[in-house]
């Protein structure tokens, strides 16, 4: 016979500071719980393990982690997933910095190693500032074609 334990459940919820749905009562010892009439009886039952609070259920982050891993590997970045212009996503200045720093670094390396003269360095520095070269390799190709740099033998 199933006894009515509504009051016991309500009191336990208040004592455990949780909702009534999270109150767990030992199904094998329902008769003992039915005898708990006062709050102090319920407190004793909680301390003895007859009544417990079930753990809270949270929102699983599994799906979110999976999506984050996909994004980290370069997926989910197609035109349908984008908001904002290309310049909003990677600003013009950031792109320019990523281009000009390696080119200027290459020019300094070539000048310091004596492969080009300071005058040639200056010429190519100004051209680089004008945006003529898109990479170290592109700069070297221009220099080789113009005869300012010897072609490397691989």
Image (cartoon, rainbow, N blue to C red):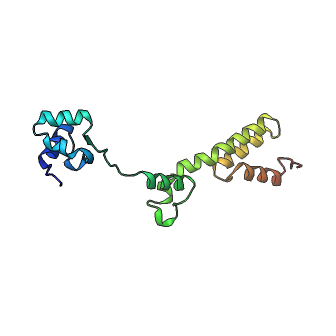
Q: Nearer the viewer, residue 61 or 133?
A: 61
Q: Farthest residue toward the left?
A: 38
Q: Quadrant of the N terminus?
A: bottom left
Please tell me which residue is depicted at 15% across the width and 49% down the height of the picture: 5
Q: Tell me residue 108's x, y (percent).
A: 73, 37
Q: Nearer the viewer, residue 88 or 129?
A: 88
- Name the quadrant containing residue 102: top right
Q: Tell me residue 10's x, y (percent).
A: 14, 45
Q: Tell me residue 29's x, y (percent).
A: 24, 44
Please tell me which residue is depicted at 53% across the width and 52% down the height of the picture: 69
* Vertical comparison of 70 with 108: above or below: below
Please tell me which residue is depicted at 51% across the width and 59% down the height of the picture: 86
- Horizontal side of residue 49 vs 104, given as left or right: left
Q: Farthest residue toward the front?
A: 1
* Vertical comparison of 39 with 60: above or below: above
Q: Nearer the viewer, residue 31 or 42?
A: 31
Please tell me which residue is depicted at 77% across the width and 34% down the height of the picture: 112
- Name the quadrant containing residue 106: top right
Q: Tell me residue 71's x, y (percent).
A: 52, 55
């Amino acid at each position: 016979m199933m006894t009515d334990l509504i009051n016991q459940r309500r009191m336990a919820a208040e004592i455990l500071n949780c909702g009534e749905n999270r109150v767990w009562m030992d199904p094998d010892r329902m008769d003992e719980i039915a005898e708990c009439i006062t709050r102090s009886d319920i407190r004793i039952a909680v301390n003895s393990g007859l009544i417990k609070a079930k753990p809270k259920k949270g929102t699983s982050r599994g799906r979110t982690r999976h999506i984050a891993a996909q994004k980290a590997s370069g997926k989910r970045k197609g035109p349908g997933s984008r908001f904002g212009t290309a310049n909003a996503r990677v600003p013009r200045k950031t792109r320019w910095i990523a281009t000009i720093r390696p080119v200027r670094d290459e020019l300094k390396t070539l000048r310091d190693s004596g492969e080009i003269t300071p005058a040639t360095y200056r010429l190519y520095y100004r051209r680089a500032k004008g945006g003529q070269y898109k990479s170290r390799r592109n700069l070297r190709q221009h220099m080789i074609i113009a005869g300012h740099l010897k072609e490397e033998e691989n």
